[in-house]
Image (cartoon, rainbow, N blue to C red):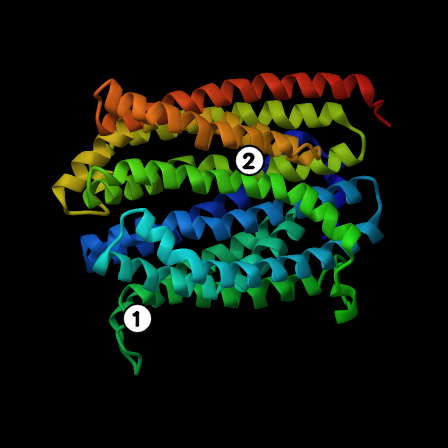
Amino acid sequence: MNNFSELTTDPIPVLIRRLAIPAGTGFFFNTMFNVVDIWYGGRLSTTALAAMSLSFPVFFILLSIGAGVSTGTTALIGHALGRNDHETARIYILQALSFALLNALFLTALGISFSPEIFMFMGAREEYLALALSYIDVVFAGAPFFMLNFVMSAILNAHGNTATYRNFLICGFLLNLLLDPWFMYGGFGLPALGLPGVALSTVAIQCLGNFYLFNRLSRTEAIPSFTLRELRPQWNYYRNLFGQGFPAAMNMMTVTLGIFIITWFVGRYGQEAVAAYGIGTRIEQIALLPVMGLNISTLALTAQNFGAGQIGRVRQVLVLSLRYGFVLALSGTAAALIFTGELMRLFSSDEKVVAIGIRFLRVEAWVFPAYVLLYICVAAMQGIQRPSLALWIGLYRQIAAPAAAFPLLTVSVGMGIIGIWWGIFSVTWSAALFVVFYVTRVLKMLEKEIVPP
């Protein structure tokens, strides 16, 4: 990884493509990984599919903490590299690894202990509850593997290397195509595991990813060698990782809470509605995949250029990323509207599930551009070490506004489940427009305060 200096000198359009395309490709295969899981879950039963959808908000707790630690790691290492402080970057790399592992062990204990109460609160009972628990317990047992992969990919991203993690995600997707049916249905001496087999496949692939990513890191200048002593917690570095990662994690956690809120409201309309919402959100992820690589490139580029004091380049990164992202999002909107029914039927043969999902996507497709504004602007603020915006926007968008809008639209106005979809639309667009205004103002202030080198 000798290209960290290029992030502060090479043309911005070239750098965005160099980082965003591999990252976006990785996101595509990661989402396809999840799509494979949902497809096989749907082959078991509608209840199994609903159990996976119900498990996602709980699974997202793990992803939230991992994404927060990852974001903080990229921002701090990138800032150190931008100011040419390689020793500090090395310390952050090693401290981030131990920080992630400690967080993972805590999450394993917490997740396995409290998942039953969470699922029952969300309305799961009997077979529905048992299936959801059988899936999520395996996932939480593998939390250390997930967390270490998050951090190692963040280290690579901070150095401008998004290709290595992409390679892992591609290989993981291909392995999942083989392991999901094997673990679900059994064979070659393995008993049929059913839905827990889907989770076990995911954990096994994450474990293999640990070996691959660590092998790649150990061959680079980032950490060619180290001692276990260097992994011992150094509280000042932990404090900085927490300070940068906590708002990002809490922002993601608000997404988790937001999914809880949406799932709770949707769950009042039956298991078919929950299954349709789960499928619809996966289709949404697919439509937004071309944009997701821009989040990674924006974070890495703003972190290093902010560290180097080049605010003009930070602004250029933001403007170009938004421009590219908006075009891609509108393309996703068009595709989702044209092929709504066909996309839903890829994942379910239950016509009630399909009908609910079609109505959801016909509204949600128009929210795609708003997500672009939110994601890229928040990534830029995290890159310039102002992560608190993400938390406050998350609290508004995922908790406060939906808690008010959904009862109003579904009950008071009498729109029923359609009111939930239009509530998501109005809340997301209002948050996106505010974020654009706020980020524009912050960059103007920084341009006055920081004199470029």
Q: Residue at x 48, y 49 (%)?
A: 61
Name the secondary structure under disc 2: helix
Of the image marks 2 and 1, the number of the one nearer the N terminus? 1
Residue tagged 1: 182
Residue tagged 2: 294
Looking at the image, which residue sits at the far bottom? Answer: 189
* Label 2: how many Cα within 10 Å (few below 14, some 14–19, many 20+): many
Residue 3 appears anywhere in the view: no
23 or 208, nearer to the observer = 208
Q: Is residue 218 left or right of residue 379?
A: right
Rendered location of residue 269, percent (x, y):
20, 37
Rendered location of residue 47, percent (x, y):
21, 54
Rendered location of residue 129, percent (x, y):
27, 57
Rendered location of residue 97, percent (x, y):
67, 59
Q: Residue at x 30, y 28 (%)?
A: 420
Q: Is residue 236 left or right of residue 123?
A: right
